[in-house]
Amino acid sequence: MYTQENTICTISTKKGEGAIAIIRISGNKAINICHKIFISKKIKSLKDFKANKVYFGKIKKEDKVIDEVLLTFFKAPKSYTGEDIIEISCHGSEFIQNSIIQLLIQNGCQLAKRGEFTFRAFINGKLDLSQAEAVASLISSKNEKSHNLAMKQMRGGYSKQIKSLRERLIKFGALIELELDFSTEDVEFANREELLELLSLMSDKIKPLIKSFKYGNAIKNGIPIAIVGPPNSGKSTLLNKIINEERAIVSNIKGTTRDVIEETFTIEGFQFRFIDTAGLRETDDKIEKIGIKKTHQKIEEAAIIIYVIDINDFNSNQLNDNILSFSKKGTDYILLANKIDLSNKKVNINNYHKEIIYCSILNNEGLDEIQSSILQKIKKWETINHDLVITNQRHYEALVNTLNSIQSVKRGISSNISGELLAIDIKEALQYLGEITGEITNEHLLDSIFKDFCIGK
């Protein structure tokens, strides 16, 4: 997969032409290789390279000048990768970029693989694995909130807490392993009461992290808002109004929307995924049934449901049943009584609803109130400690598995099972926690993580 034996290089800026491009080199031969192609009045020998300095000079191939550039040197171990790094800032011509890369390769560099710079930072102890994954999240962040989460996780976030808990559990695991060496003497080195206290503390720390995933995942990938309701209630019109584009087909024929239509939109730093769905009703149309099935799937996944009814034509029983189901699941929802331009009716439903917004989506009446209601529901998430929020599916699964292992250890202690079986459950918990921070890894895991990085990072 990756190796640290070679000095690597790549273009770190976006492919294509631009004013400036950056070429990055990392490895123990970085200075030697660049010295062969970089000419500067201030650099006469390898010894003249000073850390954290920027040098102006020329990249030359034999007697031909390729470009005038700025060269920056970061000396190991005080660099991103923990190795000597040189960054060449050249003009953004694709010809210039490719010419410099070819020169570097000819003089001993190898092209970097995806994520290889961050992989070296991980291997050299500059980042743990969760921080390395946060780098990828930071690069792919598309809004202020996901950027903030990625920044905090890259700085350590909850991984420090995970490491601390794991280190304490390791000590108990070692004591129980020691007991096995003296099994014939019936000795107990690991105090079971203290172990139970630690396990309870770990459970108390891990449960909020698991719970935070719904929030973190939504912030990272866009907060899913399902627009649902009966046919012809105004769902597609609402989607079009929100994104200010004729994205969904609007028709007075019932059953027009037969599949989900999804669009992203950013409001006050939050990225939302607005999902228009097939109208909820009984139908014999096979295609429409598939669309309605997808509607129910999106309802399950949604952070917020916008339930739209036509105030002049709705089924009270169906409305009450749906509102009751949302309430029981604890899903936030907004009830829109649409088409008030055609009627002065009021909606008479049971006490399950939290709020009703009377609106005319077609005439832009109530749209500001809808947006304010969405933000009000989301902003309560800002009370969450962002240092302790997980956004990564892999971390979520590892924490769930850790919690299950912890529960097994606690049950084992209560049942007074043998130290050998207790040690197995403790090892499992340590394994899952170690996978989060990278203290326990394998080649397949690392490959699956770093292959999704962009080249140059």
Image (cartoon, helix red, strand yellow):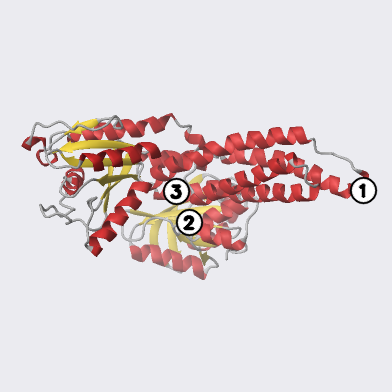
Q: Quadrant of residue 331?
A: top left
Residue reaching furthest to the left: 342
Task: Judge by depth and name the residue closer to the eye, 255 or 236.
Answer: 255
* Residue at image mark 3: 137
Q: Amino acid at mark 1?
A: Thr
- Residue pointed to by mark 2: 24
Tell me the residue at 61%/46% (across/down): 404
Q: Earlier in the sequence, mark 1 or mark 2?
A: 2
Question: The N terminus appears in which quarter of the rendering?
Answer: bottom right
Examine the image and state in which quarter residue 188 appears: top right
> Can residue 272 be seen in this snapshot?
yes
Residue topped by disc 1: 184
- As measured in the structure, the alpha-carbon distance from the residue carrying label 1 to the one carrying label 2 is 61 Å
Label 3: few (<14), some or many (≥20) within 10 Å?
A: many
Please tell me which residue lies in front, 48 or 274: 274
Residue type for callout 2: Arg
- Per the image, label 3 sits on a secondary structure element best described as helix
Q: Position of residue 11 (x, y in %)?
A: 43, 59
